[in-house]
Image (cartoon, rainbow, N blue to C red):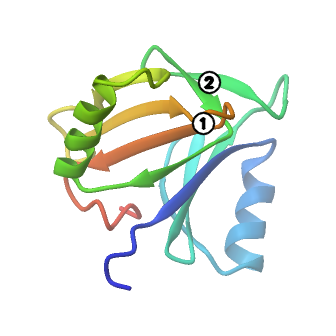
């Protein structure tokens, strides 16, 4: 099982404090990276990304991150940097619907990451990402 990669799910929440109490105090999860509009949660070795949406809360929304419309909810996979590059190159030669073109976020920093979003044939949004450092440790 050592090859198992963390699975993650990103979804909207109305209240960070209530959400943190539930995931940390009730379930025993730990918090990871976070900011004013999102919070990572170590969900038993997997990743939840809580996106704060105070107004116009809906099941399917799009948030502006780095000038890209990021669909919420979505799920994804954290993969090794070279595997992400291989997947990006493989997808380029298909008619796959890229919701967010591949790009580098926070380039030149310890939190540098590559990101791309696609949709499956049923319209479900999938994100593939890799951190330049510590892909297995998304908690720091």
Q: Residue 63 carries which label?
A: 2
Q: How many labels does the image show?
A: 2
Instruction: Say if residue 37 shows up in the picture.
Output: yes
Answer left or right for 23 relative to 56.
left
Number of the front mark, 1 or 2: 2
Q: Residue furthest front?
A: 94
Q: Which residue lies furthest to the bottom in this view?
A: 1
In percent of the image, x 76 and y 67: which residue is there? Answer: 21
Closer to the camera in the image, 140 or 136: 136
Answer left or right for 55 relative to 34.
right
* Residue 72 percent coordinates (x, y): 67, 34
In percent of the image, x 33 and y 31: which residue is there? Answer: 91
Q: Which mark is residue 37?
A: 1
Asked if the residues shown at circle 1 and circle 2 are in contact, with their CB atoms under 8 angstroms apart, the answer is yes
Is 106 drawn above or below residue 29 in the view shown?
above
Is 127 drawn above or below residue 29 in the view shown?
above
Is 12 drawn above or below residue 107 in the view shown?
below
* Residue 109 percent coordinates (x, y): 19, 40
Instruction: Say if residue 36 shows up in the picture.
Output: no
């Amino acid at each position: 099982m050592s090859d198992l990669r963390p699975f993650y799910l990103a979804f909207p929440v109305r209240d960070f404090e209530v959400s943190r109490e539930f995931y940390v105090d009730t379930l025993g999860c730990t918090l990871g990276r976070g900011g004013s509009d999102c919070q990572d949660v170590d969900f038993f070795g997997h990743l939840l990304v809580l996106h704060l949406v105070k107004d116009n809360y809906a099941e399917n929304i799009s948030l502006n991150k780095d000038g890209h419309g990021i669909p919420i909810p979505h799920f994804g996979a954290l993969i090794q940097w070279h595997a992400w590059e291989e997947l990006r190159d493989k997808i380029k030669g298909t008619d796959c619907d890229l919701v967010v073109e591949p790009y580098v976020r926070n380039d030149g920093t310890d939190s540098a990451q590559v990101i791309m979003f696609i949709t499956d044939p049923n319209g479900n949004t999938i994100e593939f990402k890799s951190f330049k450092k510590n892909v297995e440790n998304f908690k720091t």
